[in-house]
Amino acid sequence: MPNHRAEILKVVATVVLGLQVLSIGARANDAALGSLTVVGGEVQMDKVAAIPGTAVFEGDVIATGSKSGARIDLRSGTKVTVAEKSEVTLLYDTLNPGVELREGALVIQTDPVQASQVNTRFGTSLVLRSDDGFPALCRVASNGSEVAVLNEKGHVEIHGAGAPTMLPPGEYVVLRAGSPQAGPKTAGKVTAAIPSEVVERGGTSAFPLNLSDAVFWQDLVRTEMNGRVRIELLDGSLLNIGARSQMRIIMHDPATEQTEIELGVGKFRGQIVKMTKPGASFKIKTQTAVVGVVD
């Protein structure tokens, strides 16, 4: 008598194998957009633990956890560094390949020739282009209600409902529902940094601080473990922030010589330039006192 059970299992196996071949074949026909590098901890791709070096395709969702990160190297030459607790989706565009930032933070660097794109949850997109052959570099962070964009260098265009808006190098804006809003004024830049140190800006996720990065009014600079950072303000004053400290630059206006610093916890040492204008002040606030600098 024929073994009907064996025949049924054979048919099922053939169908399943055929589906797998079709699935793999369909995926293989799609051009890979680049590759994924896992940086510490677990990174998921399409809700499955990602394998370092695996190819990434249009629509793939990359999600990082706590204390983990990822780097996406696109075939176009664009490099996307995804911060912890972030989620991005791969985009395919023949003109501007890139990613969509769903939440968290990323740093994107373009190819010297090929432009790149970052889409936001508000329907706004950022188009990045190099400047005279030098790659553009942009930081983007989203906390759900707003998106913060900092143009480190290169050309960054904000595309929304109206005409595109140019974001000059060193400038910072906040996007809410696709509308760019002026960001805080520049206070100075980082002149020395010992990891780990980060900055929280506009209520968004924390960014790592690097040498020559700009700092702005209302930035909260936080050092962790043995991290230290030195900031040179626009008037030439130096702020040295010790390990395990938090400092916020409330304001710094070199034109009126008005500066206000808030030290939450930790240690801070300042080297303040001479003030000459009437009403000039340099104040450091703590939880229990206010310290003023007088010439």
Image: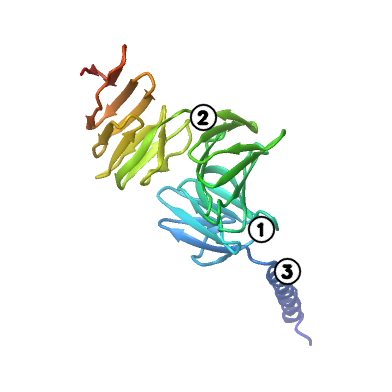
164 or 241: nearer the viewer: 164
x, y (%) of residue 142?
54, 38
Query: Disc 3 marks which residue?
Result: 26
Give how far apart the Cα atoms at labels 1 and 3 are.
13 Å
Q: Which residue is mark 2?
A: 183
Give the residue pinned by disc 1. 58
Looking at the image, is mark 1 or mark 3 earlier in the sequence? 3
Q: Position of residue 292 (x, y in %)?
A: 24, 17
Q: Quadrant of residue 13?
A: bottom right
Identify the mark nearer the N-term, 2 or 3: 3
Q: SS for tag 2?
A: loop
The nearer-to-camera label among 2 and 1 is: 2
Mark 3 is on which residue type?
Answer: Ala
- Could you tell which of marks 2 and 1 lies nearer the N-terminus? 1
- Would you call the spot at circle 1 few (<14 residues within 10 Å), some (14-19), or many (20 or more)? some
The percent position of residue 177, horizontal first and vertical second, equals 64, 31
Q: Position of residue 242 (x, y in %)?
A: 23, 37
**Placement of the N terminus among the 4 image quadrants:** bottom right
Query: At 26% across and 38% down in the image, what residue appears?
Result: 244
In the image, what residue occupies the spot 24% across and 27% down?
Answer: 272
Mark 1 residue type: Glu
The single residue placed furthest to the front in the displayed view is 276
Secondary-structure class at tag 1: loop
